Image (cartoon, rainbow, N blue to C red):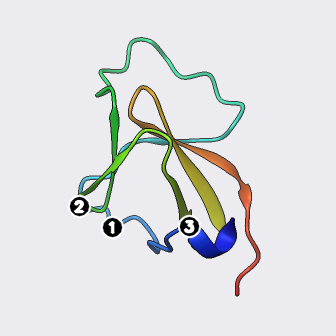
Amino acid sequence: MADHVPQVGAPDPELKTSPIFDEYDEISLDLELEAGICYFNNVAYPVGQYLRSGSELLHCEERGVWVRKGEIPPD
């Protein structure tokens, strides 16, 4: 799977990136989150998309947030 997951680097604080949560964090319902799309450095990704940010594996979840799913060793 790692070969098919885009490497996007680190989030740029000046570009739009959806919130990133740890796998076991509880996501507050008070957060105004977009549904159906995640952003990483101004690029939109569909729900279900996996990305690599450095060695972290991120997954776009339904409420438009990234969830860390573990680490992938560097190539």
Query: In the displayed structure, would residue 41 be above or below residue 45?
Result: below
Q: Nearer the viewer, residue 47 or 31?
A: 47
Crowd tier of the residue under label 1, counting other residues whose Cα lies within 10 Å: few below 14, some 14–19, many 20 or above: few
Give the distance between the C-alpha atoms of the residues marked 1 and 2, in whole angstroms. Answer: 5 Å
Residue topped by disc 2: 15
From the viewer's side, name the closer residue of 13 and 74. 74
The part of the image, by quadrant, that contains residue 57 is: bottom right
31 or 52, nearer to the observer: 52
| Location of mark 1 (residue) | 12
Look at the numbered disc 2 and give the secondary structure of its residue: loop
Q: Is residue 70 left or right of residue 47?
A: right
Q: Which amino acid does label 2 sit on?
A: Leu
Circle 1/circle 2 CB separation < 8 Å: yes
Q: Which residue is pictured at 39% across the width and 12% down the height?
A: 30
Q: Earlier in the sequence, mark 1 or mark 3?
A: 3
Give the structural element (helix, strand or loop) at label 3.
loop
Q: Earlier in the sequence, mark 3 or mark 2?
A: 3
Residue type at mark 3 is Val
Mark 3 vs mark 2: in front: 3
Q: Position of residue 63 (x, y in %)?
A: 41, 26
Instruction: Tell me the residue that label 3 is attached to.
Output: 5
Asked if 9 appears above or below 38 in the picture, the reply is below
